[in-house]
Image (tube, rainbow, N blue to C red):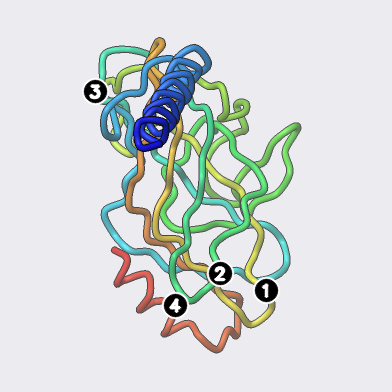
């Protein structure tokens, strides 16, 4: 009886190992090799920012992507992370602009198939997902001009973002870059501006 139990336990372990191997192989076939760490792409903002939204219209902010590597980095997806007692931003759209040297959040409105900032930034130049960013040339200081469009906070409320996660690949190697991006946006007349500002300062 003991050898029978041991035999079943050994077969169960072998089945688990085989299943795990299939998952790994399937992932490699579907996504390619997984890179270590953030890889060459980053979107980190070094300072906490707080902005005001004046109505129900969407707001936008820059995603200054920097590619420190030697190959093209193709963006596959972007996540905006909250992580405080305030809601996080609700993503509406992602795009590439001709210029996005704009700090904080700005009013945004539809432009063609995408969006632009009001009173800052350049024209909409296409979707961010699937866009390939080359290595940073010497003239790039704020990063390649990518941007996000998000919903305004609820009336008299705020939202707080702490991080941006960018999924991308270089050749057949896939990466997930997680970078600090402390940003708070509050509606005009919001009651918790001070608390939202403290939350974003703590995140920074």
Q: Is residue 39 left or right of residue 147?
A: left
Q: Is residue 36 left or right of residue 184?
A: left
Q: CA distance from mark 4 to mark 1?
A: 14 Å
Q: CA distance from mark 3 to mark 1?
A: 41 Å
User: For the residues carrying marks 4 and 3, which lies nearer the camera in this image?
Assistant: 4
Say if residue 132 shows up in the picture.
Answer: no
Q: How many marks?
A: 4
Q: CA distance from mark 2 to mark 4?
A: 10 Å
Q: Earlier in the sequence, mark 2 or mark 4?
A: 2
Q: CA distance from mark 2 to mark 1?
A: 10 Å
Q: Are marks 2 and 1 in contact (CB under 8 Å)?
A: yes
Place residue 33 in its image quadrant.
top left
Q: Earlier in the sequence, mark 3 or mark 1?
A: 3
Q: Earlier in the sequence, mark 4 or mark 3?
A: 3
Please give the label number shown on residue 87: 2
The residue nearer to you, when weighing 164 against 57, is 164
Residue under numbered circle 1: 154
Please tell me whether residue 181 is drawn above or below residue 197 in the rendered image.
above
The residue nearer to you, when weighing 12 against 128, is 12
Q: Are marks 2 and 4 in contact (CB under 8 Å)?
A: no
**Disc 3 element:** loop
Residue under numbered circle 3: 138
Place residue 95 in its image quadrant.
top right
Q: Is residue 68 left or right of residue 88?
A: left
**Residue at point 26% right, 28% down?**
36
Task: Please state, as top left, top right, bottom left or bottom right, where the N terminus lies in the image.
Answer: top left
Q: Are marks 4 and 3 in contact (CB under 8 Å)?
A: no
Residue under numbered circle 4: 196
């Amino acid at each position: 009886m003991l050898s029978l139990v041991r035999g079943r336990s050994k077969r169960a372990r072998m089945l688990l190992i085989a299943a795990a191997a299939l998952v790994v192989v399937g992932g490699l076939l579907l996504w390619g090799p997984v890179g270590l760490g953030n890889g060459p792409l980053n979107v980190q903002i070094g300072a906490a920012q707080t902005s005001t939204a004046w109505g129900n219209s969407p707001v936008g902010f820059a995603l200054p992507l920097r590619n420190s590597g030697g190959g093209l980095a193709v963006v596959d997806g972007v996540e905006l992370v909250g992580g405080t007692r305030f809601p996080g931003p609700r993503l509406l759209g992602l795009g590439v602009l001709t210029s996005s040297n704009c700090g904080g959040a700005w009013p945004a409105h539809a432009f063609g198939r995408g969006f632009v900032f009001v009173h800052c930034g350049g024209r909409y130049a296409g979707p961010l997902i699937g866009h390939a960013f080359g290595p940073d040339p010497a003239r790039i200081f704020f990063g390649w001009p990518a941007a996000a469009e998000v919903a305004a906070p609820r009336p008299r409320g705020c939202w707080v973002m702490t991080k941006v996660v960018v999924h991308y690949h270089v050749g057949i190697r896939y990466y997930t870059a997680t970078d600090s991006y402390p940003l708070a946006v509050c509606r005009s007349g919001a009651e918790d501006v001070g608390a939202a500002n403290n939350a974003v300062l703590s995140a920074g």
